[in-house]
Image (cartoon, grey):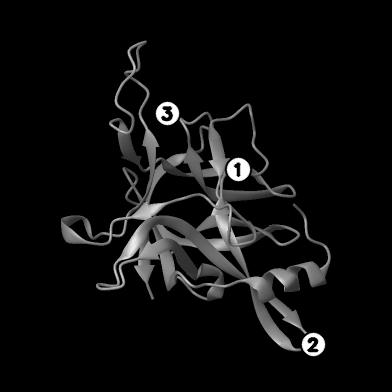
């Protein structure tokens, strides 16, 4: 969806209610095997009100590298966040009355390339419809690593298994050079649906949310 009318974007900004939001965070990106990869995610222009999540080496700098986590609920007694949720970037919209911010949720579902198993992480206006992600934030696994949960069908047979018994956490994040959005060539954070990635430039990485 392309937004060329500022009034439409302003409506998104005015209607955004961040009742279940934490942050801001930086998205720390490190290589799974390539230890030279050590940087942070940044939102880069990829079209009209469209951003791609790209990799920048070194320390983060500026609001293009600040993100929020919209969670599904929380424990009123402990304040613990219920996961999964979505990663959101705030698109600044400058108008006559100052700057407002349009929430954009991270998604993989736009502009699908059916010839590839690699899908770039993108941000589009709206704080709903994003990819549901979780991160380790307590106990021994409190490293804030970002992951998705899915159903492992690699052992399926005609015998019906117990539903939910095959859920697994996966971290198929990669950095891949590719065209995104309106034809922008970036090294983007991407999700690889099956291994190995069809794009030979992809490098496996981990993502972690670092509270600012």
Residue in the picture at 64% in, 37% down: 112
Quadrant of image for the C terminus? bottom left
Disc 3 is placed on an element classified as: loop
The label nearer to you, 2 versus 3, is 2
Q: Which numbered disc covers residue 96?
A: 2
Residue at the left extreme, as displayed:
140
On the picture, is 209 further left or further right than 98?
A: left
**Above or below 96: residue 172:** above
Does label 3 or label 1 sit earlier along the sequence? 1
Q: Which numbered disc covers residue 157?
A: none
Residue ID for mark 3: 195
Image coordinates of residue 126 in percent, x first then y, are 64, 61
Image coordinates of residue 5 in percent, x first then y, are 83, 66
How many numbered tags mark residues here? 3
CB under 8 Å between callouts 2 and 1?
Answer: no
State the CA–CA distance, disc 3 to disc 1: 19 Å
Residue ID for mark 1: 109
Does label 2 or label 3 sit earlier along the sequence? 2
């Amino acid at each position: 969806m392309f937004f060329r009318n500022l009034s439409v974007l302003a409506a998104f900004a005015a209607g955004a209610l961040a009742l279940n939001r934490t942050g801001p965070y930086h998205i720390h990106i490190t290589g799974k095997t390539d230890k030279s990869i050590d940087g942070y995610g940044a939102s880069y222009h990829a079209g009209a009100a469209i951003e791609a999540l790209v990799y920048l080496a070194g320390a983060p700098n500026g609001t293009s590298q600040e993100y929020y986590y919209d969670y599904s609920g929380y424990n009123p007694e402990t304040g613990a966040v219920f996961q999964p949720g979505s990663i959101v970037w705030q698109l600044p919209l400058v108008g006559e009355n100052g700057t407002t911010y349009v929430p954009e949720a991270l998604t993989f579902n736009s502009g699908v390339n059916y010839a590839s198993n690699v899908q770039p992480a993108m941000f589009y206006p709206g704080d709903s419809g994003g990819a549901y992600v979780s991160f380790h934030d307590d106990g021994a696994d409190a490293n804030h690593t970002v992951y998705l949960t899915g159903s492992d069908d690699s052992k399926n047979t005609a015998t019906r298994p117990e539903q939910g018994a095959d859920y697994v956490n996966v971290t198929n994040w990669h950095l891949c050079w590719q065209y995104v959005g309106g034809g922008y060539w970036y090294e983007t954070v991407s999700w690889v649906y099956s291994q190995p990635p069809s794009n030979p430039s992809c490098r496996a990485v981990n993502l972690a949310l670092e509270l600012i």
